[in-house]
Amino acid sequence: MKLLIWAVMLIMFTYTIGFSITLWKEKSRAGSIIVLIIALAIAVSPFFTVLR
């Protein structure tokens, strides 16, 4: 089960980082930074909830 959680977390993190990079290249700097913060929240939140 933990492997599934890690896989989903990694996929979501990778997709969100990719979207942040796309926004940065399109000169939407503020949006890119906010999406990057969301990606970091995706990476950190399972440690406080599911993966104790």
Image (cartoon, rainbow, N blue to C red):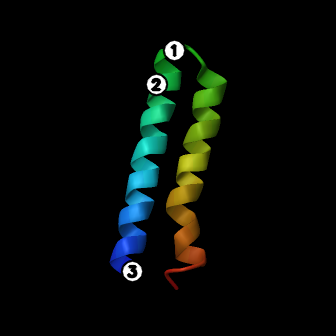
Residue at the spot x=44%, y=62% of the render? 9
Element marked by disc 2: helix
Q: Position of residue 12 (x, y in %)?
A: 46, 52
Q: Position of residue 51 (x, y in %)?
A: 49, 81
- Disc 3 from disc 2: Cα separation: 30 Å
**Which quadrant is the N terminus positioned in?**
bottom left
Residue at the spot x=35%, y=65% of the render? 7
The residue carrying mark 2 is 22
Residue at the spot x=51%, y=14% of the render? 26
| Residue positioned most to the top | 27
- The disc, 1 or 3, on the residue closer to the chain's N-terminal end is 3
Q: Quadrant of residue 42?
A: bottom right
Q: Amino acid at mark 1?
A: Glu
Q: Position of residue 4 (x, y in %)?
A: 37, 73
- Disc 1 from disc 3: Cα separation: 36 Å
Residue 26 marker: 1
Element marked by disc 1: loop
Q: Residues within 10 Å of mark 1 (few under 14, many from 20)?
A: few
Q: Amino acid at mark 3?
A: Lys
Q: State whether residue 23 is above or below residue 3.
A: above
Residue 2 marker: 3
Residue 30 left/right relative to 13:
right
Residue 22 left/right relative to 45:
left
